[in-house]
Amino acid sequence: MSTNTPGLAQHALLRRRLYQVQGMPAGDILPSPCVSVCSMDPDSGLCRGCFRTLEEIADWALQTPNSQRDIWRRVAQRMTPPTV
């Protein structure tokens, strides 16, 4: 498997982080969705690893906790099960 192709381990890590984020109190700084699979899908415009746009990736550290939570919500909506 290429390092630019997300696998089951990366998807599992992203799902674990998503569940962690969902349980965190409002106002807490959230962990990044990044799973070190940094490859943009030209059709969707999303990172194949974390399902964020380039703008969401570049601005992550500048976002408020509420904005980070909104990005996590969008990531959860964009996630699809990996194919084996």
Image (spheres, rainbow, N blue to C red):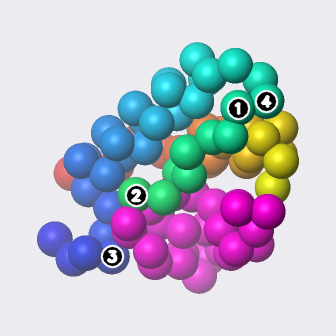
Helix, strand or loop status at disc 4: loop
- Answer yes or no: do the residues labelled 2 and 3 have beta carbons within 8 Å? no
Q: Is residue 78 left or right of residue 64?
A: left
Q: Amino acid at mark 2?
A: Val
Instruction: For residue 43, say whether it is visible.
Output: yes
Residue 82 in picture, x, y percent from top left: 34, 49
Which of disc 3 and disc 2 is earlier in sequence? Answer: 3
Q: Which residues are magenta?
A: 36-62
- Answer yes or no: do the residues labelled 3 and 1 have beta carbons within 8 Å? no
Q: CA distance from mark 2 to mark 3?
A: 11 Å
Q: Label 2: which residue?
A: 35
- Answer yes or no: do the residues labelled 2 and 4 have beta carbons within 8 Å? no
Q: How many marks?
A: 4
71 or 30, which lies in front? 30
Residue 9 in picture, x, y percent from top left: 24, 47
Residue 71 in picture, x, y percent from top left: 73, 47
Q: CA distance from mark 1 to mark 2?
A: 20 Å
Q: Label 4: which residue?
A: 27
* Main secondary structure along the magenta-highlighted residues: loop
Mark carried by residue 75: none
Other-residue count near label 4 (Cα within 10 Å), few / some / many at <14 / 14–19 / ≥20: few
